[in-house]
Image: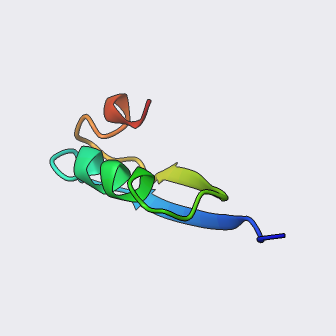
């Protein structure tokens, strides 16, 4: 049995890169993971792009 891997991404002014980052993660062959997006009070629209 494979262990769960947690991918923790701090979110601060990454609006332009967030979608590409998440696509890269979901395109991996490893399937047992969770992604935690931690908003650090980003002033841009990063939070809207998190969903």
The quarter of the image holding the N terminus is bottom right
> Seen in the image, is 13 located left or right of residue 25?
left
> Seen in the image, is 21 located left or right of residue 38?
left
Picture quarter containing residue 33? bottom right
Choose between 2 and 34: the one closer to the eye. Answer: 2
Choose between 31 and 22: the one closer to the eye. Answer: 31
Residue ID at (30%, 40%): 46
Residue sitting farthest toward the left: 16
> Seen in the image, is 8 located left or right of residue 26?
right
Residue ID at (51%, 53%): 38
The quarter of the image holding the C terminus is top left
Picture quarter containing residue 3? bottom right
Percent x, y of residue 12: 32, 55
Q: Is residue 27 above or below residue 47?
A: below
Q: Is residue 28 above or below residue 19?
A: below
Q: Is residue 49 above or below residue 17?
A: above
What colour scheme has been applied to the protein in the rendered image? rainbow
> Seen in the image, is 30 located left or right of residue 40?
right
Percent x, y of residue 35: 56, 53
Q: How many marks?
A: 0
Residue ID at (20%, 53%): 17
Percent x, y of residue 27: 38, 54
Percent x, y of residue 25: 41, 58
Q: Is residue 33 above or below residue 16?
A: below
Residue ID at (25%, 34%): 45
Residue sitting farthest toward the right: 1
């Amino acid at each position: 049995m494979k262990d769960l891997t947690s991918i923790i991404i701090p979110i601060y002014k990454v609006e332009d890169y967030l979608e590409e980052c998440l696509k890269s993660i979901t395109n991996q062959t490893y399937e047992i993971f969770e992604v935690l997006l931690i908003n650090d009070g980003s002033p841009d629209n990063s939070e809207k792009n998190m969903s």
